[in-house]
Amino acid sequence: MPVSMTGFGRFETNEDAWTHVWEIKSVNGRFLDVKWRIPGFLRGLENGWEKILRGFGSRGRVDVSLNLEVLDSAILGVTFNETLARAMFAEMERVAASRGEVFTPDYNRVLAMSALWRDSGSEPDSGLAASLSAGLEAACRDWVRARSDEGAVLVADLRARLETLRDLAGRIAARIPDVLEEKKAGLRQRIGEMLASMGAEYTEERMLQEVAFITDKLDVTEELTRLYAHLDRLAETLDGDADVGKKLDFLCQETFREINTCGNKANDVAVSRLVVDFKAELERCREQVQNIE
């Protein structure tokens, strides 16, 4: 079943040493474009997480955010360089004593000194990494559920619109024989009047040749056959589950091409009105298709 490219997924994990919340938001897009909002020390895991996400979606603009709170400081691998700090304090105490003053450290300033803090530079804690990956997969499943629900609504709407298109195509097909007869009668009359005004000899054989030539140019039987085939193919594609959006978009383009040719060839007011209605409904279908993966 086709799924929508628009959706939202969320999953929260609470453990003794950490809590984290994954959120996934997506809108339609021609290709899969993922934007990650994650803490810097987890960037090394991004490639693996990208592979997980691609297992759940293939198109759309996707924003993935992680809200992480670590409750055990040891997991972060951050340490304070106490040796350097003591050396700095001792030196400042010496300078202060030489001036007859007492040095009192400002610990708030010390906390802001990046040189006193060391990051182990190691890989994130394995337990945390596994928990984050599991949380991402759960959020992806929630994301797919939301997109599937939206996709079902889109499919139902498209099926209803395809029925409208079939009805309009049927009305066009029903009108074409009348158009051909009207064109034939008008053509016979015009040719007869022209021959009479020129004093030329009238022959039924020549008349039939001219009528056959003109009516062949007006006949849209082949276009209508292809049009119905495209509508059938659109309905079949809605039952698929791979690259549905791209196939539907291509079929909509082909359908538009055929109905446009029908309108141009028929050269009839009633048919033109039906063609305009068909194009308007087909455009609504195309807009819906842009949201399907």
Image (spheres, helix red, strand yellow):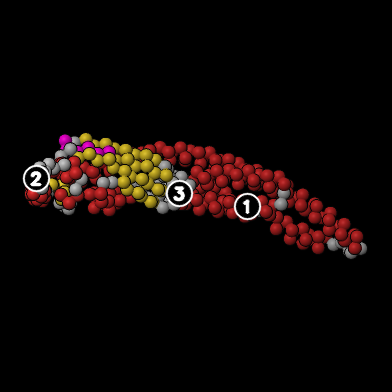
Q: Is residue 175 above or below residue 202?
A: above
**Who's the residue at 86% across and 57% down the image?**
192
Number of residues whose C-alpha sits closer than 10 Å to that of mark 2, classed few (under 14), some (14–19) or many (20 or more): few
Region in magenta: 16-21
What residue is drawn where x is 63% and y is 43%?
Answer: 277
- Secondary structure mostly seen in magenta is strand
Residue, disc 3: 245
| Residue 133 image offset from top left, x and y in percent | 24, 45
Q: Indicate the position of residue 83 as horizontal and vertical percent values.
A: 8, 50
Residue 159: horizontal and vertical position, in percent?
A: 51, 40
Q: Nearer the viewer, residue 59 or 248?
A: 59
Circle number at residue 100: 2
Q: Toward the viewer: 165 or 280?
A: 280
The answer to whether residue 18 is magenta is yes
Q: Amino acid at mark 1?
A: Asn
Q: Quadrant of residue 223?
A: bottom right
Q: Earlier in the sequence, mark 2 or mark 1?
A: 2
For marks 1 and 3 on the same chain, the one whose residue lies earlier in the sequence: 3
Q: Residue at x 77, y 53 (%)?
A: 184
Q: What numbered label is drawn on residue 205?
A: none
Q: Is residue 103 left or right of residue 217?
A: left
For this rendering, which residue is in front, 201 or 15?
A: 15
Q: CA distance from mark 2 to mark 1?
A: 96 Å
Viewer-proximal residue, 51 or 80?
80
Q: Are marks 2 and 1 in contact (CB under 8 Å)?
A: no
Mark 1 → mark 3, Cα distance in angstroms:
23 Å
* Residue depicted at x 84% and y 54%: 189
Question: Which SS class for mark 1?
Answer: helix
Q: Is residue 100 magenta?
A: no
Q: Is residue 33 visible?
A: yes
Q: Amino acid at mark 2?
A: Gly
Give the residue at mark 1: 260
